[in-house]
Amino acid sequence: MVIEADVVPGLLQIMSLREDPRATLEATWAISNLLTSAQPEQMAYLIGQECVPLLCSLLTYKKVNVVQAALNGIKSVLVAGEKASHEAGDNRNLHLIEAVNG
């Protein structure tokens, strides 16, 4: 429903601007929650929207609750990759995170 409403790009923009810590936190939690409950096609969409590099960049954010939300999202990406790797034999999501020094 959130993906269909096309709010993901706006949430990612809020996360990337980092102007307001509260808005950054809420947007990061929203993306993290989407990742946690994402079906494979939704996960692919979110990854395609470049949420992984953005989440990894937030690991150095000044507010610990934003870092926690980012870690939650990264964990969800890794778990989804682990599930998919049983079929493919390799966790591609892990490589995405490593590629951005996450």
Image: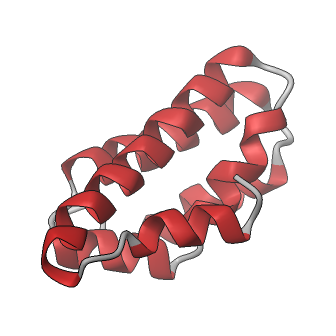
Query: Which quarter of the figure has residue 73?
Result: top left
Image coords of residue 62 (percent x, y): 86, 23
Residue at 30 percent of width and 69 percent of height: 43
Image coords of residue 23 (percent x, y): 66, 35
Image coords of residue 64 (percent x, y): 71, 16
Residue at 32 percent of width and 64 percent of height: 81
Display colour scheme: secondary structure
54 relative position to 61: left or right: left
39 relative position to 85: left or right: left
Query: Which quarter of the figure has residue 45?
Result: bottom left
Instruction: Please state, as top left, top right, bottom left or bottom right, where the N terminus lies in the image.
Output: bottom left
**Is residue 53 among the parts visible in the rendering?**
yes
Image coords of residue 10 (percent x, y): 58, 64
Q: Looking at the picture, does residue 56 appear above or below residue 86?
A: above
Residue at 77 percent of width and 51 percent of height: 57
74 relative position to 102: left or right: left
Residue at 18 percent of width and 61 percent of height: 83
Q: Residue furthest top?
A: 64
Q: Looking at the picture, does residue 57 appear above or below residue 39?
A: above
Tally of marks: 0
Q: Residue furthest front?
A: 89
Q: Looking at the picture, does residue 21 appear above or below residue 98?
A: above
Q: Looking at the picture, does residue 62 appear above or below residue 76?
A: above
Comparing 4 with 99, the one in front is 99
**Is residue 6 among the parts visible in the rendering?**
no
